[in-house]
Image (cartoon, rainbow, N blue to C red):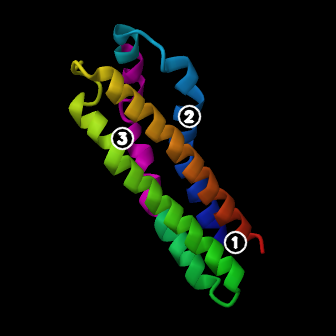
Amino acid sequence: MGFLAVVITGLSLIAPAAHAFELLNKIGLPQAEYFIVQQIYSGWWMLGLFLPLAFLANVGNAIVLRADRTAMMLSIAAAVLIALNLIVFMLFTQPANAATQNWTVQPDNWEALRAQWEYSHAVNAGVNFLAFCCATLASTR
C-alpha cells in the first residue's frame, strides 16, 4: 500500500507542479496571449483524478501502518494535505475556470481571475509536494 500511496501522490503532483513552474512566464502575458496559452490545459482535468485516488491511497496506507504511530500520522498528514488541495481548488481555481468558461470567455475582471487561478495552483503545488514528502516518509519507515 505504501508504494501505491507514494506513486499516486507523486502523480497527483504533476499538474500543480507544472502550473507552478510556468507561473512566472505566464502571469504577465497580455490578455490575448494568456487566453491562447490557457488552451494547452484542455483535457488536464483527467490529471485531477489522481487527487481523490491519492487521498484514498494515503488513508489506506495509514490503516496499514497503524502499528507505527509516526508512519500512520505521516500518512494521515498526506491525506489531509491532499484534501486541502481539493479545497483550495474548489474555492479558488474552479471559480476562475467557471467565470471564464475554462478560459474561453474573457470577462472584464480576467486579470483578477488569472491571479486567483495561477496562485491557487502555486499554493497547491506546495501543498501537494508536502503530501508527497509525507507519503514517502511514511512508506519508507
User: CB under 8 Å between callouts 3 and 2?
Assistant: no
- Mark 1 neighbour class, 10 Å CA radius: few under 14, some 14 to 19, many 20 or more: many
Q: Quadrant of the N terminus?
A: bottom right
Q: Which residues are magenta?
A: 36-53
**For residue 44, what is the image quadrant?**
top left
Which residue type does callout 2 highlight? Ala
Secondary structure under tag 3 reads helix
- Provide residue 33's location: percent of width, then percent of height: 40, 10
The residue beneath circle 3 is 93
Q: Is residue 101 visible?
A: yes
Q: Nearer the viewer, residue 25 or 11?
A: 25
Vertical order, 50 against 141 (above or below): above
Label 1 sits on what residue type?
Ala
Q: Secondary structure at mark 2?
A: helix
User: Which mark is on residue 20?
Assistant: 2
The residue shown at (70%, 63%) is 136
Q: Which secondary structure class fits the magenta region best?
A: helix
- Inter-mark Cα distance, 2 to 1: 25 Å
Q: Is residue 45 magenta?
A: yes
Q: Is residue 99 left or right of residue 118?
A: left
